[in-house]
């Protein structure tokens, strides 16, 4: 049971709602408005687990007064039951807070069982969702894993930050047996544990074939100096320049039939090596990928096809096991993807879905150019605006590129705008103008946007009281009373906070829709890039897991964003600002209940 609610109209705490993911429980409550005049000072939450052990939330194990109407418990186990009791606390006769129960109506309890990615027999659910922590810049991380600036992450720190994300991929690869097939496509590909697992799979007879980015990109500098210790450097040679590469002294090996990997060996004279590197040399990212593969030993490079014919970015991140399971999402196979920025992996155990990915993968393997993929996609449908209103649960897959005339981006925006109660969006870079326009419309829905950083468009979005935008941020030393200074992992150069690519439409309704995958809901992601997206409609379990993880990040960054922008409010206004339903202050402090209404 991933949603639970206890309505107690005669209590001071009139409604307690709980929503569970696999490792987090989200709690929200309301109170009788008359309580503000009765000296209400805050709330306490007591948790009781299956073994009867009791603990207080919010004070690192100690009793703590909470001045909020929402809280999250990050210390739960997967597939376990908990009771949460919310106590209202009032001023005593001396004016100080009294922790004694005023009467039996001062508290309300709710019981909930956390979600699991596996059923009681241990078999995986059709849909599995894994989100990393994405909050190295947090009080919890600084307290658990103190380290000096530049000091490498410990193994325990990596496990905590991964929160099962890296393990979800490694478990799939490690389970592959002799005769199994692994087919994948990745944009960034240097995460050593995954590369080592793939090499071990190859060595034990698993058929591994992966397509990775090797496109021309003017924004990425090519190396011009021979790397220390390298015996060979693989080149970026696009099909129309193969004769030039051969004439300049490059060599090639066939990969899976007609596909070729071009390279230059150390034995070639230095002048020719330099000329080839200037013309066809890899970027630093590609060189890091090749180095990581070489350090794994074996012949993993023989399982790689370099994607050179995409006019945009080969931005996929997926792996297919046989024709049964798909691992996909926002996560690049890098340390920064697993342990740094916030990312999600979605696993679908469904043959029909896997077959669609295999068909797409076959197009990538044969080197289809962007125009050819646009044509291949031309007969594919686009999502229905009312996807969540369909009877039963449906899962559909959508691939890019789709060309300049595709209505796909407009359809994403229409679906976002069609939300009846709430819509949630992550934006790693910017919010497309079509989505901004939807945010300007006056509807009954609340809209929550979680972004990497501030942009001018944010003002336009936030002009509508029903929209809330939160950006990634960390607290510097002394930025907030009682908080230690925070620091990130140092793994991310560009996207440091939010790398998710998800849209949630009416997530708390009976007919929710979850859209997730590799695409940023941008023009490039629809028209030119290699991308894949899932649209999961009518599955409350999936929606609950995504909403809890979205709100975990939204809540974490909300305070930090406000502090960084200098928008903190005085504590003595926390009650009065939040009592008038429908105002921005009420929405800010009742996000969960706003989404449910």
Image: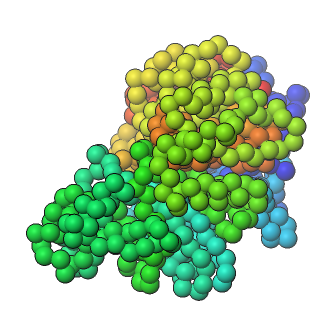
Q: Quadrant of the C terminus?
A: top right
Q: Nearer the viewer, residue 47 or 254?
A: 254
- In the picture as drawn, the residue positioned furthest to the left comes out as 271
Instruction: Return the x and y of residue 137 as percentages of the image width and height.
Output: 44, 50
Picture quadrant of residue 440: top right
Residue at 46% x, 24% y: name it. Answer: 458
Residue at 45% x, 66% y: name it. Answer: 259
Instruction: Return the x and y of residue 168 as percentages of the image width and height.
Output: 62, 65
Residue 132 vertical placement versus 199 (above, below): above
Q: Is residue 92 visible?
A: no
Residue 243 vertical placement versus 466 (above, below): below
Residue at 26% x, 67% y: name it. Answer: 246
Left of 410 or right of it: where is 245? left
The coloring applied to the image is: rainbow
Residue 469 vertical placement versus 167 (above, below): above
Q: Nearer the viewer, residue 515 or 493?
A: 515
């Amino acid at each position: 049971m991933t949603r639970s609610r206890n309505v107690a109209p005669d209590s001071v705490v009139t409604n307690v709602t709980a929503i569970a993911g696999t490792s987090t429980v989200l709690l929200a409550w309301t109170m009788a408005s008359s309580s503000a005049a009765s000296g209400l000072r805050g709330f306490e939450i007591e948790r009781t687990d299956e073994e009867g052990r009791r603990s207080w939330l919010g004070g690192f194990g100690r009793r703590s007064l909470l001045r909020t109407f929402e809280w999250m418990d990050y210390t739960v186990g997967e597939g376990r039951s908990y009771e949460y009791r919310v106590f209202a606390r009032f001023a005593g006769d001396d004016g100080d807070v009294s922790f004694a129960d005023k009467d039996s109506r001062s508290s309300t309890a709710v019981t909930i069982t956390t979600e699991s990615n596996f059923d009681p027999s241990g078999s995986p659910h059709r849909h599995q969702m894994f989100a990393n922590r994405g909050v190295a810049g947090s009080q919890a991380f600084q307290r658990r894993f103190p380290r000096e600036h530049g000091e490498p992450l410990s193994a325990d720190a990596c496990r905590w930050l991964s929160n099962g994300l890296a393990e979800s991929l490694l478990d799939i690869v490690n389970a592959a047996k002799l005769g199994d097939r692994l087919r994948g496509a990745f944009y960034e590909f240097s995460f050593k544990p995954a590369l080592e697992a793939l090499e071990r799979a190859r060595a034990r007879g698993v058929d591994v074939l992966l397509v990775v980015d090797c496109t021309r990109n003017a924004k990425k500098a090519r190396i011009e100096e021979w790397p220390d210790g390298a015996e060979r450097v693989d080149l970026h040679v696009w099909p129309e320049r193969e004769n030039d590469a051969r004439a300049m002294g490059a060599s090639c090996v066939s990969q899976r039939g007609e596909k070729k990997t071009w390279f230059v060996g150390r034995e070639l004279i230095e002048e020719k090596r330099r000329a080839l590197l200037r013309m066809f040399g890899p970027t630093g990212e590609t060189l890091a990928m090749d180095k990581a593969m070489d350090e794994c030993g074996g012949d993993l490079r023989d399982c790689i096809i370099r994607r050179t014919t995409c006019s945009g970015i080969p931005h996929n991140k997926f792996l297919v096991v046989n024709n049964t399971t798909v691992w996909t999402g926002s996560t690049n196979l890098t340390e920064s993807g697993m342990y740094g920025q916030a990312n999600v992996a979605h696993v679908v155990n469904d043959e029909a879905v896997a077959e669609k990915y295999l068909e797409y993968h076959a197009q990538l393997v044969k080197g289809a150019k962007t125009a050819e993929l646009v044509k291949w996609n031309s007969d594919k449908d686009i999502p229905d605006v009312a996807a969540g209103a369909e009877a039963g649960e449906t899962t559909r897959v959508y691939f890019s590129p789709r060309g300049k005339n595709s209505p796909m981006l407009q359809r994403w925006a229409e679906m976002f705008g069609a939300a009846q109660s709430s819509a949630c969006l992550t934006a790693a870079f910017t919010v497309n103008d079509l989505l901004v326009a939807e945010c300007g419309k006056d509807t009954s829905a609340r809209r929550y946007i979680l972004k990497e950083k501030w942009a001018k468009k944010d003002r336009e979005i936030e002009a509508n009281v029903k929209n809330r935008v939160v950006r990634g941020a960390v607290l510097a030393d002394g930025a907030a009373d009682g908080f230690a200074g925070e620091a990130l992992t140092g793994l991310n150069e560009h996207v440091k906070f939010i790398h998710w690519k998800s849209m949630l439409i009416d997530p708390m309704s009976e007919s929710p829709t979850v859209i997730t995958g590799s695409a940023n809901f941008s023009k490039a992601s629809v028209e030119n890039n290699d991308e894949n997206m899932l649209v999961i409609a009518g599955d409350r379990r999936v929606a609950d897991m995504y909403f809890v993880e979205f709100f975990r990040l939204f809540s974490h960054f909300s305070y930090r964003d406000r502090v960084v922008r200098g928008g903190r409010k005085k504590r003595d206004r926390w009650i009065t600002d939040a009592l008038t339903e429908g105002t921005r202050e009420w929405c800010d402090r009742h996000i969960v209940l706003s989404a449910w209404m």
